[in-house]
Amino acid sequence: MGMLDAPDRHELEEVSTPLYANRVRVYPQAVQGRVRRAKWAVLVFCLAVYYLLPWLRWDRGPGQPDQAVLVDMAHGRLFFFWIELWPQEVYYLTGLLVLGAVAIFAATSLFGRVWCGFACPQTVWTDLFMWVERLIEGDRNARMRRDRKPRWDWSDRARKLAKHGAWLLIAMLTGGAWVMYFNDAPTLLRDALAGDVSLAVLGFFGLFTGTTYLLAGWAREQVCTYMCPWPRFQAAMMDADSLIVSYRGWRGEPRGKARAAGAGDCVDCRACVNVCPTGVDIRDGVQLSCIGCGLCIDACDSIMTKLGRPEGLIAFETLNNLAASEAATAMLPPGAARRGPGMAARQAPRILRTRTYLYVAVLCVVAGAMLAGLALRQPGGLEVLRDRAPLFVKLSDGSLRNSYTLKLSDRRHEAATLAVTVEGLPEGTHLQVVGSEASDAAGRPLVTTKPDGVAEWRLLVTIPAGALPQADSTDVTIRLLEPAGDRSLASQHSVFLGPKP
Amino acid sequence: MANKIEHDAVTGRQTTGHEWDGIKELNTPLPKWWLWTFYATIVFAVVWCILYPALPFTGATGLLGYTGRGEGEQALAAHRAATEPMLERLRQTEIEQVLADPELRAYAVAGGRAAFANTCAGCHGAGGQGAQGGFPSLADDDWIWGGKPADIEQTIRHGIRAAEDPETRTSQMPRFLADGMLTAAQVNDVAEHVLSLTGRATDAEAASRGAAIYAENCAACHGDQGQGNHEVGAPRLNDQVWLYGGDKASIVRSISYARGGVMPAWGQRLDPAVIRMLTVYIHSLGGTE
């Protein structure tokens, strides 16, 4: 409401909804069942990988880090088991991101928001924090009662303190594990215990400790509903054949007491709402705040079992099937009579659809390109940079010289000695490598590579005055050979330039 | 803003009263923590302005006393401190030993390349290719004052004909025509002889007349075969490299009015370590003796 044209309160028929609302606290209840067990399994797996991976060792020989997964910022190397990436190969990471994105698209088109509900770090850590909260503060009712108390007694305060302490401890372990991916884990732990860590390590440790505590302890479902961009466009990946967490309204409606005549299967016990980590009512249909975790399925199933009714009032179901069941049961009386015909009207969900074909095709292409790139990767490479200033040098006896900078990259961890040849130039052409006097039996200059690095050499190529080429530009091939056996290891094309004839 | 509360016909929910081309925005209340986060960013900005010099035209320095120049100076000082041990090693090591030590040599080539671009490339070109008109190429094998690493170091330190340095090396070619030492015809004959040293004479008779004049006037510095003399900075005349042009007109001009380029002395302006790095870099260009 503007200040100038503030409304006369008496003219208003009702009070307007405020533009800003207080957060409604969610107190999710504990629940057991198949989905919950699956969620626990994913949680244990994800957290175990995250916390333990930095401690896995992988022998790469002397002088090399023996951590299986390590991002070595100082030396610009990324180690992943047997793979070692250099900074210029960052496109493998890009490929991984593309794979991850398309995999999520594919999973979403098949099963709705399974990423959000099961594997997203926000969900996993929030789940862990809620479990800790339940252990210390009790289940939903106990927590609600405590928070409604006007004054906390000593036991309440002790429990709150213990909960936040435990949360902070987990958050610190999380921040601690993060920095281990960028530093040798045992060394870092030893240094940390001795109080000797860099500001950068401390900063990232603090950052990830703070965000874990804040996002998993305090922000929780607010992250999914208000901060995360993914729910905004994930609807674009889903269609009427996606298996999403759904309430079978055709079976549940109208809601009523268990023994009430003319009532559907839903007894309006609100178990599905009470266990929801984001506090939504799944019976309202697909909605932004629903993260698709499926805990409401477990909650409803347990109630249905108690009532002696079949499970599946809430289930992973497609919109197509919901519509088909709805149509098949519209004329039948609510309750037990609808169950059979409604379920019979369903069809097996169509897994193979245009979009899933496309997602799988993109996945295969990207994964194939990455695998091929990795498999065909050479242990070494040669880059030739021709000197442009000067283009060529005329020497006092009239001979012409061109110079080239050779960059020899070598992933192997031992230095190799290689012979340099230049093809395409006349007999009598003289090769000289600045700073390397060595040459092999055939008189070719020798260069050495830098183990796990790039060696730089300057090659001077001189054509004697009597043999100068007729053209001002001659194509040449600069080649690196193994001195024994003459096997070509790498070659590059370049040119030899002279004055215009 | 509408005075009356409006309800959306489809959803039955209240609108905010905002309308764009007939589209009305439903009122979905934002959580208050979001609003408070927004206020917090405003507070952050104010605190930032107080701590750092963020207010333009006021000359305010900020409570922390931070300046971009200060940070740059700190970074420069840190860099100097970090490079000092290596520079000291370069100062203490003779040039030949530097060239023999792969680590020092690589360091010097990299540092020398930067210093060369800064101080030398203006005259000698980006890669030491030189320029016509008195700026010698440093990449070829023709050296006027000597091309051994020690000679090059000496030339950089004390310059050539550098008035500011008493230890500079200097020599003066006579102005044979301008000062009346030779006639125009004699100059022409000498020029023909000089051309004949590289087999380019067009007038054999003039060249043979010039040979006698050359022996009397030029050979003392340039050598009887035109081989030049590093000691006095007399260029070779029997090779393919000509600093002021090798055609006859240029040679006639050189004899008539003399030449004599000036190279500044850098010993007072550059750190000895930088001069050593420059020497190693020039050596790496491939033309040194």
Image: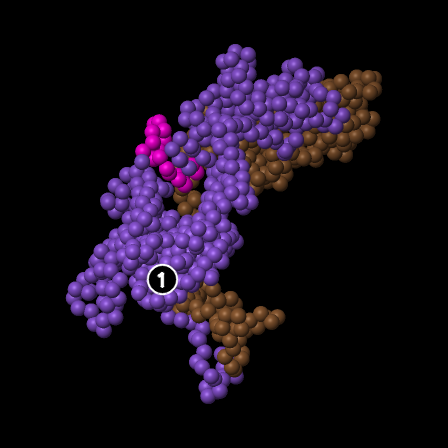
- Answer yes or no: is residue A332 visible: yes
Q: Amino acid at mark 1?
A: Cys
The boundaries of the magenta stretch are: A57-77
Residue A142, by quadrant, is bottom left
Is residue A485 positioned above or below B44 on the image?
A: above
Residue shown at 28% from the left, 39% from the top: A186
Residue annotated with mark 1: A266
**Magenta residues, dominant SS class:** loop
- Answer yes or no: is residue B98 visible: no
Measured as percent of width and height from the top left, residue A417 is found at: 47, 20
Seen from the viewer's position, the closer of residues A6 and B44 is A6
Task: Indicate how the structure is coloured in the image.
Answer: by chain
Measured as percent of width and height from the top left, residue B196 is found at: 76, 19
Seen from the viewer's position, the closer of residues B135 and A386 is A386
Residue B221, by quadrant, is top right
Residue A466, by quadrant, is top right
Is residue A272 left or right of B152 when viewed as pictured?
left
Callout 1: few (<14), some (14-19), or many (20+) C-alpha neighbours within 10 Å? Answer: many
How many numbered badges does the structure rendering display? Answer: 1
Q: Chain of mark 1?
A: A
B270 inside magenta stretch: no
Query: Seen from this angle, which residue lies furthest top?
Result: A441
Residue shown at 41% from the left, 58% from the top: A338
Measured as percent of width and height from the top left, residue A405 is found at: 56, 29
Q: For chain B, what colour was chosen?
A: brown
Residue shown at 62% from the left, 41% from the top: B122
Chain assigned purple: A
Seen from the viewer's position, the closer of residues A375 and B87 is A375
Seen from the viewer's position, the closer of residues A390 and A441 is A441
